[in-house]
Image (cartoon, rainbow, N blue to C red):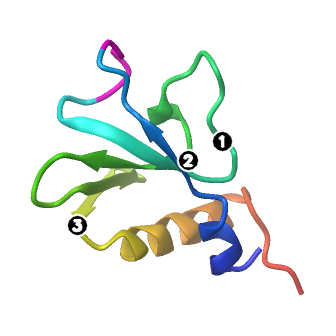
Amino acid sequence: MNFKQFQDTRKKMSNPKDSESYTEGVIGAFVYLDSFMEGYGITESICIEIFDDKLPYYIMIDRSDYQTDNLEKLEKLLYSFCLEEGYIEVQA
């Protein structure tokens, strides 16, 4: 899977107002690789959280936090993480 194919798996999920699985201020998430499973919170998925503030996109990878208004930058970090962890493979 190349980076463009990875981006094409993105699905936007909204934050239900009564959800306890979200961090305060999160209004939704972009979920990748169909990793959202019913009964689990979006934060347990391969996702980038969407905040309602100046730096709307957030991700945590290996205990490192990244927050920016540049979605593609975070997608590249997430794509690299998925490659390293074996969630996806680059096709020859």
Mark 1 near mark 2, Cβ–Cβ under 8 Å?
Answer: yes
Q: In the rendered image, which quarter is residue 43 located in?
A: top left
C-alpha gap between disc 1 and disc 2: 6 Å
Instruction: Please name the residue shown 26% across and 30% down the image.
Output: 23
Circle 3 SS class? strand
Which of pointers 1 and 2 lies earlier in the amino acid sequence?
A: 1
Q: Nearer the viewer, residue 24 or 44?
A: 24
Residue beneath the point at 22% across and 56% down: 56
The residue to which callout 3 is attached is 68
* Left or right of 74 on screen, residue 31: right
Report the side of 84 relative to 90 (left or right).
left
What residue does disc 2 label? 46
Above/below status of 78 relative to 36: below
Residue 73 is left or right of residue 33, and the answer is: left
Write down the region rendered in magenta. Answer: 18-22
What amino acid type is highlighted by mark number 3?
Thr
Whether residue 26 is in magenta: the answer is no
Numbered disc 2: secondary structure = loop
Q: What residue is at 60 percent from the left and 15 percent from the top?
A: 39
Count of numbered tags: 3
Whole-percent x, y for residue 80 in the image: 56, 72
Q: Is residue 76 above or below residue 18?
A: below
Q: Position of residue 7 (x, y in %)?
A: 59, 69
Q: Position of residue 54 (x, y in %)?
A: 10, 59
Q: Say which residue label 1 marks.
A: 35
Looking at the rendered structure, the kind of residue marked 1 is Ser
Decide: marks 2, 3 in contact (CB < 8 A)?
A: no
